[in-house]
């Protein structure tokens, strides 16, 4: 197979090497990244799987690139993951080593693992012969993603899927080594890590990570050479608010207007935010649609017209169809159906979950996305909803209601719990917990329950609102009627 990251080949030792990644003041050139990742790669070669403590730092980039070069599957970990979720991920993915920055404090759930501190300078000489390129189907990353029930599942992403998806985006967006990508996405999910870091590295271009999202950071980087911005709708919503705020459009409008591409993904960008940004900058935000399991499926092309409410046509190599409840493929795509996709961009399966993997695919190899859509006459896909009401998208993170309910039930003050998502202008959806307190005493407060969930799972999974009830509404079979909770 051709190299996944060709720009690293031959970069080692060069003094005229271009910038690869920048986190604030910390810059790594291709030569530095090649050397640091080669020396770490030599240390981890042959390991079964490595966990990466995926802070938003150059160390995370070095760790992931080292694993990719050594052909060792990497499991990126959210450094804010709570104890229960982390214990699950470690037990499920069974890494032999954890890669972390020298200053990172690791939680006890990782205590049993060998730790290697990641440096951004080469510590040991890289292997003379370089690294042999692993096969296309070999696993590159295992990314954990929530389902409706139970703990998150590890999506096994082969090298072939990463290469195919990034090359389809190259085709759609004219993405080149000249591009300088700006973003502030976390590096433990597909959006920030695969699109946001491996994307620029595969093209031989560069990425500037803001560390933490801010409108000033976006404006600064786009006005000083950034050509593309990737973000989740919450970020664009905040930019739209800033443009309409008391300070007025100013520099931010100039920065956004001057970028080659503004791309939103991970959830739907509301029409109102599209319009506010277009009104202040005179240009549109384009959307692309993907999933952890499928990487990218559709995207508005750079030479196409952004259209609010649509995610563009299927990307090169992706077969996309709409299917009725009974499995019939829709011929009339103005009707709503479930999106199913097939192509080289798909994952190979869920780690240790052959049952879930089998259920996710149709007999003819299409992946059931669970997203409901129509297709406009010109081929633009319009996502109108989701099959599972128990999946919540908040701030671009996918969160299963079931995992939060289970966490809430572990609190001694909670007898019964149900979790729903409610529309939220900033987050898209906010997590709402409906709680029946245990016993007659004072019920646990909203803050206490939010902290409890944040400690067990992750801060982004915490309920933003808690509503107390005497009993949950149930049907004759005892099943909680979530629809009446929403009402
Ligand atoms: C708050 N915090 C807490 C608690 N409450 N920590 C512990 N216990 C608590 N009770 C902390 C948080 O960790 C965070 O820290 C800070 O307080 C603010 O938290 P929060 O309110 O959750 O953050 P926010 O300001 O609302 O964040 C908005 C955001 C974020 C920046 C847009 O949601 C985000 O980064 N979203 C990106 C999600 C993403 O990448 N999804 C891609 C999935 P601190 O500030 O230090 O962190 S991949 C995908 O979907 C597919 C493939 C696709 O199509 O892309
Ligand atoms: P995740 O499981 O976190 O990878 O999230 C994947 C889900 O995010 C998809 O199944 C969609 O529901 C949603 N999604 C991603 N991009 C978009 C988009 N541009 N518009 C609407 N929904 C999106």
Image (cartoon, rainbow, N blue to C red):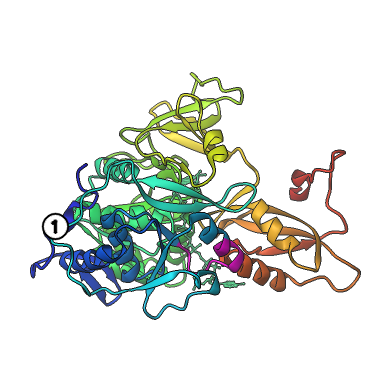
Count residues near mark 1 (Cα–Cα under 10 Å), then give few for <14, some for 14-19, many for 20+.
Answer: few
Name the image quarter holding residue 182.
bottom left
Determine whether 313 is above or below 145 in the image. above
The quadrant of the image that shows the N terminus is top left
Residue 302, how many percent across, how many down?
A: 28, 44
Does ligand 1 reach within 8 Å of label 1's beta carbon? no
Q: In terms of image quadrants, where is residue 135?
A: top left
Residue 328 makes an appearance in the image:
yes
Q: Residue furthest right?
A: 440
Picture residue at 52% right of the left edge, 34% below the top: 373
**Relative height, residue 65 to residue 168 (above, below):** below
- Dot 1 lies on which element? loop
Residue furthest bottom in the image: 103
- Whether residue 296 appears in magenta in the rendering, the answer is no
Residue 83 colored in magenta in the image: yes
Per the rendered image, the range of residues in magenta is: 77-87
Q: Please name the residue that numbered disc 1 is placed on.
A: 129
Residue 465: give x, y in percent of width and height.
Answer: 69, 63
Image point (60%, 37%), residue name: 387
Q: Left of 441 or right of it: where is 354?
A: left
Q: Between 436 and 428, which is closer to the camera in this rendering? A: 436
């Amino acid at each position: 197979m051709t190299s996944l990251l060709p720009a690293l080949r031959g970069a080692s030792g060069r003094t005229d090497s271009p910038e690869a990644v920048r986190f604030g003041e910390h810059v790594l050139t291709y030569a530095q990244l090649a050397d640091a990742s080669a020396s770490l790669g030599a240390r981890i070669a042959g390991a079964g799987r490595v966990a990466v403590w995926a802070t938003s730092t150059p160390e995370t980039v070095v760790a992931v690139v080292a694993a990719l070069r050594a052909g060792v599957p990497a499991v990126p970990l959210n450094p804010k993951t709570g104890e229960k979720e982390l214990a699950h991920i470690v037990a499920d993915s069974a890494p032999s080593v954890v890669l972390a920055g020298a200053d990172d404090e690791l939680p006890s759930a990782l205590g049993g693992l060998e730790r290697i501190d990641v440096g951004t300078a080469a510590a040991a000489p890289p292997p003379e012969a370089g690294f042999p390129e692993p096969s296309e189907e070999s696993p590159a990353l295992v990314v954990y993603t929530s389902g409706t029930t139970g703990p998150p599942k590890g999506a096994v992403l082969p090298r072939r899927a990463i290469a195919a998806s990034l090359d389809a985006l190259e085709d759609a967006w004219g993405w080149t080594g000249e591009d300088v990508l700006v973003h502030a996405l976390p590096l433990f999910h597909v959006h920030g890590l695969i699109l946001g870091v491996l994307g620029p590295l595969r093209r031989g271009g560069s990425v500037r990570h803001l560390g933490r999202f801010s409108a000033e950071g976006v404006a600064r980087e786009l006005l000083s050479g950034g050509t593309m911005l990737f973000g989740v709708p919450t970020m664009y919503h905040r930019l739209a608010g800033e443009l309409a705020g008391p300070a007025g459009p100013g520099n931010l409008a100039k920065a956004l207007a001057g970028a080659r591409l503004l791309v939103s993904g991970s959830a739907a960008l509301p029409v109102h935010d599209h319009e506010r940004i277009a009104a202040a900058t005179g240009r549109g935000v384009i959307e692309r649609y993907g999933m952890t399991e499928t990487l990218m499926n559709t995207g508005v092309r750079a030479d196409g017209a952004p259209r609010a409410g649509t995610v563009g046509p299927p990307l090169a190599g992706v077969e996309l169809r709409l299917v009725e409840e009974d499995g019939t493929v829709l011929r009339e795509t103005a009707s709503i159906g479930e999106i199913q996709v097939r192509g080289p961009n798909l994952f190979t399966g869920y780690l240790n979950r052959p049952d879930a993997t089998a259920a996710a695919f149709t007999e003819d190899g299409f992946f059931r996305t669970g997203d409901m859509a129509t297709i406009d006459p010109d081929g633009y896909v319009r996502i109108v909803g989701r099959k599972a009401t128990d999946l919540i998208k908040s701030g671009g993170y996918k969160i299963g209601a079931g995992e939060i309910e289970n966490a809430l039930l572990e609190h001694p003050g909670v007898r019964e719990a149900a979790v729903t998502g409610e529309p939220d202008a900033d987050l898209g959806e906010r997590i709402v917990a409906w709680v029946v307190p245990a016993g007659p005493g004072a019920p646990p407060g909203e803050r206490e329950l939010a902290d409890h969930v944040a400690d067990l799972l992750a801060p982004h999974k915490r309920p933003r609102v808690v509503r107390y009830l005497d009993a949950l509404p149930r049907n004759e079979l005892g099943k909680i009627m979530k629809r009446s909770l929403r009402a």
